[in-house]
């Protein structure tokens, strides 16, 4: 399977609603590596690596978010994987 890197900025009501934990659980379920964090701009940023179909699955879930979130916009970039992660974690 093709390996890829997904970089996403999620805008909307995404802080203070469990979004980072939601992403952590989804990424772990899919076996992805990388990180998720809140930004100063009140967005959530995600960098994940793994098989392209699994990343596409994560991206679909990011459009939904957890129950209390309201996702308004996603900025998505596909990149070549760097292989720098060993797990998925919440940072910052």
Image (cartoon, rainbow, N blue to C red):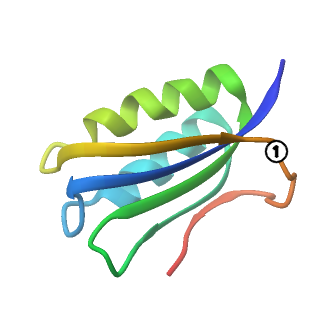
- x%, y% of residue 38? 38, 72
Instruction: Please state if 22 lies on the left or on the right of 8 as rendered.
Output: left
Quadrant the N terminus occupies: top right
When the figure is inspected, residue 44 is found, relative to residue 32, above or below; the finding is below
- Residue 85 is situated, as x and y percent measured from the top left of the image, at 79, 59
Left or right of residue 3, residue 28 in this image: left
Residue at coordinates 56% horizontally, 36% vertically from top-left? 29
Residue 81 in view of the camera: yes
Along the line of sight, the residue nearer the viewer: 44 or 74: 74
x%, y% of residue 83?
Answer: 87, 52
Residue 57, placed above or below residue 38: above
Residue at x 12%, y 50% (from the top left corner):
68
Task: Examine the rendered structure and indicate whether residue 15 appears above or below residue 32.
Answer: below
Quadrant in the picture for residue 34: bottom right
In the foreground, 77 or 68: 77
* Dot 1: element: loop
The number of numbered badges drawn on the structure is 1
| Residue at 81% over, 58% down | 86
Which residue is disc 1 drawn over? 81
Rendered residue at 55%/25% (across/down): 56
Query: Considering depth in this image, is 54 or 78 the residue closer to the camera?
Result: 78
Mark 1: few/some/many CA within 10 Å (<14, 14-19, 20+): some
- Let me know if residue 66 appears in the view: no
Position of residue 43 measured from the top left corner of the image (x, y, whole percent): 32, 65
């Amino acid at each position: 399977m093709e390996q890829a890197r997904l970089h996403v900025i999620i805008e909307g009501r995404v802080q203070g609603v469990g979004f980072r934990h939601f992403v952590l659980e989804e990424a772990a379920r899919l076996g992805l590596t990388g990180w998720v964090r809140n930004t100063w701009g009140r967005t959530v940023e995600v960098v994940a690596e793994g098989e392209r179909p699994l990343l596409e699955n994560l991206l679909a879930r990011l459009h939904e978010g957890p129950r209390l979130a309201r996702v308004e916009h996603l900025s998505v970039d596909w990149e070549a994987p760097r292989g720098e992660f060993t797990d998925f974690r919440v940072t910052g």
